[in-house]
Image (spheres, rainbow, N blue to C red):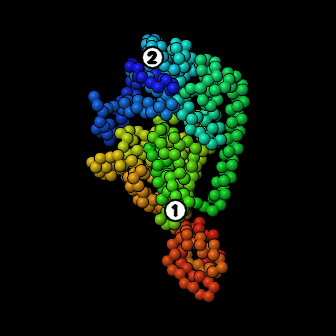
C-alpha cells in the first residue's frame, strides 16, 4: 500500500478494487487469453485484473486526481455492510490517515448502507465507480443539453443515498464527486431534489421534441445516418475527424479545427457531433460521433443520455470502433453490445472497425487480418479509410443508387449544379436550350428532379 509523491494542487486518491471469487477468472475468449499472455509486463505475467486496474487509474486521472496508493483485495463475496469487511476497513482507515489522502475511490458501486458505513469509518470522503464516472461527465459536458443530462444522472444517483452522504453534503466545496449539483445544499432536501429532477426531465423532454423536429426536417429529404459507437478511448473521434476531413463538406476539409476533440483521456467527447460526408457513389450520409461506453456504465447515464443516443437508434448503419491494440478488445466488444442491447439497436446493420492497427506488429497485424472479419484501419495514419468507405457504401440500403435520364433547361443552373455535384454524369448532350444527361446517383437526390426525367 505504497504512497506516491503527488502534486499538492491535485486531489490525492486512494484506489480500492476487490476481486471476488466468482469473478476471478481469465479473459473470456481463448483469443483474448492469448493476447493477454503475450502482452509485455515487467516483472511477471499480465492478468485481466491488471488491465481493469489500469482502466481504473485512467478514470481517476481523467477526473483530475493523483493516485496516492492502491489497495486490491480478494474476497469470496461482497460484505453487505462495507463491501470489504471490517478488518480491511480498519487497515484502509490507517493507510488513508497516514498518507493524508483527500478521498478513497472504490472501483465498484456502493449501496447507501456501505457508503454510510465507510464514511463513518474512514477519515476522508468516499466515492464509488458510478460517482467517479458522473464526475468525469460533469467536467466534459459543454452544451446545455449535456449539462442537463449529467445533472439529472447525478441527482438520480444521489437521491436514494442521501443518508450516506453526510460528509460530502455537509459543506460547500469542490473536488471529485462534488461537481455540478454536488456543490450546492440542494441534496440536503429530498423534496427539493425531487422537484429539480422533475424540472430536468421536463427540460430534456423539450430537447427531445426539438431534436425530433430537426430529425423530421432532415428526413423530409432522406439522408442516411451512420453512427460511430465503441468503448471509450477506442479512437472514435480520431476516425470521425479523418472521415469528415477527407470526405466532408469542402469547408470542413480545411483543417482539424472543424472536427471534434481528440484526446487520450476517457470520455473526452461527450456531446454528440454530426457532419455530412460523401461516399464514392456521391451519396451523402450524416456521420455522428457519440459518447464512448465503458465497463459497468452507470444505468442512470444510459437513461439520462437517451435523448442524445437517439442518433444511434435512428442510424441506418453502426460503425463499432474497437481498439485493435487492446488485449481486452473482445471484452470491450461485449460491454459495448450490452449498452447497444439497452438501446434496442443490436439488430441494426453493424460494421466492425478495428482501429489503431498502426500500433500492431507485423505478426499481430497478420493475425488480426486472418482472424477478424472487421475492417482494419488506422484513423491516425489514414490506413484502410478508403476500404471502410466502400463498405459503408455497400451496406446502406435506404438511399439506393439509381441511374436516370434527364432533360433540363440550361436556365435551371441550380439543378444542373446539384446533379453535377451529387451524381455521376455518364452522358451529356446539348439540344437547343436543353441539356440531356444520364446521371447515376442517390435516389433521394434524383427524386428531387423527377419533373425533368425524360
Report the residue at 51% width, 45% height from top.
261
Closer to the chain start, of discs 1 and 2, is 2
Q: Nearer the viewer, residue 117 or 142?
A: 142
Question: Viewed as shown, does residue 371 lie left or right of 267?
Answer: left
Residue mark closest to the camera, 1 vs 2: 2
Q: Nearer the viewer, residue 398 or 378?
A: 378
**Which residue is most to the front?**
8
Q: Nearer the viewer, residue 164 or 403?
A: 164
Mark carried by residue 153: none
3D distance between C-alphas at marks 1 and 2? 56 Å
Whether residue 299 appears in this view of the structure is: no
Q: Secondary structure at mark 1?
A: strand
Mark 1 = which residue?
278
Q: Secondary structure at mark 2?
A: helix
Mark 2 = which residue?
99
Tally of numbered tags:
2
Report the residue at 45% width, 59% height from top.
389
**Which residue is most to the bottom?**
432
Q: Quadrant of the C terminus?
A: bottom right
Within-10-Å neighbours for mark 1: few <14, some 14–19, many 20+: many
Q: Is residue 302 above or below residue 100?
A: below
**Residue 206 placement (x, y as % from top left):** 70, 44
Where, by quadrant of the figure, is residue 18 drawn? top left
Q: Quadrant of the N terminus?
A: top left
Callout 1–callout 2 Cβ contact below 8 Å: no
Within-10-Å neighbours for mark 2: few <14, some 14–19, many 20+: some
Whether residue 239 appears in this view of the structure is: yes
Where, by quadrant of the figure, is residue 6 drawn? top left
Amino acid at each position: 500500500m505504497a504512497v506516491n509523491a503527488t502534486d499538492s494542487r491535485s486531489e490525492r486518491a486512494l484506489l480500492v478494487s476487490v476481486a471476488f471469487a466468482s469473478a476471478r477468472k481469465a479473459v473470456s475468449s481463448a483469443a483474448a487469453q492469448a493476447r493477454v499472455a503475450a502482452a509485455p509486463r515487467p516483472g511477471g505475467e499480465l492478468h485481466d485484473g491488471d488491465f481493469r486496474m489500469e482502466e481504473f487509474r485512467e478514470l481517476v486521472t481523467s477526473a483530475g486526481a493523483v493516485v496516492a496508493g492502491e489497495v486490491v483485495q480478494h474476497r469470496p463475496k461482497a460484505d453487505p455492510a462495507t463491501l470489504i469487511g471490517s478488518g480491511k476497513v480498519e487497515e484502509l482507515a490507517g493507510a488513508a490517515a497516514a498518507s493524508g489522502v483527500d478521498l478513497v475511490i472504490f472501483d465498484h458501486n456502493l449501496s447507501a448502507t456501505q457508503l454510510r458505513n465507510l464514511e463513518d469509518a474512514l477519515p476522508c470522503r468516499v466515492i464509488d465507480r458510478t460517482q467517479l464516472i458522473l464526475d468525469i461527465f460533469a467536467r466534459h459536458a459543454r452544451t446545455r443539453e449535456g449539462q442537463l443530462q449529467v445533472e439529472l444522472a447525478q441527482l438520480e444517483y444521489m437521491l436514494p443515498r442521501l443518508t450516506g452522504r453526510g460528509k460530502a453534503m455537509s459543506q460547500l466545496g469542490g473536488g471529485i464527486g462534488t461537481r455540478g449539483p454536488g456543490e450546492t445544499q440542494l441534496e440536503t432536501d429530498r423534496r427539493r431534489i425531487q422537484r429539480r429532477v422533475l424540472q430536468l426531465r421536463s427540460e430534456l423532454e423539450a430537447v427531445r421534441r426539438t431534436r425530433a423536429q430537426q430529425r423530421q426536417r432532415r428526413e423530409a429529404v432522406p439522408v442516411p445516418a451512420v453512427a460511430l459507437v465503441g468503448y471509450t478511448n477506442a479512437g472514435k473521434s480520431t476516425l470521425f475527424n479523418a472521415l469528415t476531413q477527407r470526405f466532408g463538406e469542402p469547408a470542413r476539409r480545411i483543417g482539424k479545427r472543424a472536427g471534434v476533440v481528440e484526446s487520450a483521456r476517457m470520455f473526452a467527447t461527450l456531446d454528440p457531433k454530426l457532419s455530412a460526408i460523401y461516399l464514392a457513389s456521391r451519396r451523402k450520409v450524416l456521420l455522428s460521433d457519440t459518447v464512448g461506453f465503458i465497463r459497468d456504465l452507470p444505468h442512470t447515464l444510459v437513461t439520462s443520455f437517451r435523448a442524445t443516443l437517439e442518433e444511434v437508434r435512428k442510424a441506418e448503419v453502426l460503425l463499432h470502433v474497437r481498439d485493435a491494440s487492446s488485449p481486452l478488445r473482445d471484452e470491450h466488444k461485449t460491454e459495448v453490445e450490452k449498452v447497444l442491447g439497452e438501446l434496442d439497436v443490436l439488430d441494426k446493420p453493424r460494421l466492425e472497425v478495428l482501429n489503431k492497427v498502426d500500433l500492431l506488429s507485423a505478426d499481430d497485424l497478420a493475425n488480426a487480418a486472418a482472424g477478424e472479419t472487421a475492417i482494419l484501419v488506422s484513423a491516425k495514419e489514414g490506413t484502410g479509410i478508403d476500404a471502410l468507405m466502400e463498405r459503408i457504401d455497400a451496406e446502406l440500403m435506404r438511399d439506393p443508387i439509381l441511374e436516370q435520364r434527364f432533360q433540363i433547361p440550361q436556365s435551371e443552373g441550380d439543378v444542373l449544379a446539384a446533379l453535377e455535384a451529387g451524381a455521376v454524369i455518364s452522358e451529356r448532350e446539348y439540344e437547343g436550350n436543353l441539356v440531356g444527361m444520364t446521371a447515376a446517383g442517390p435516389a433521394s437526390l434524383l427524386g428531387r428532379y423527377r419533373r425533368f426525367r425524360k
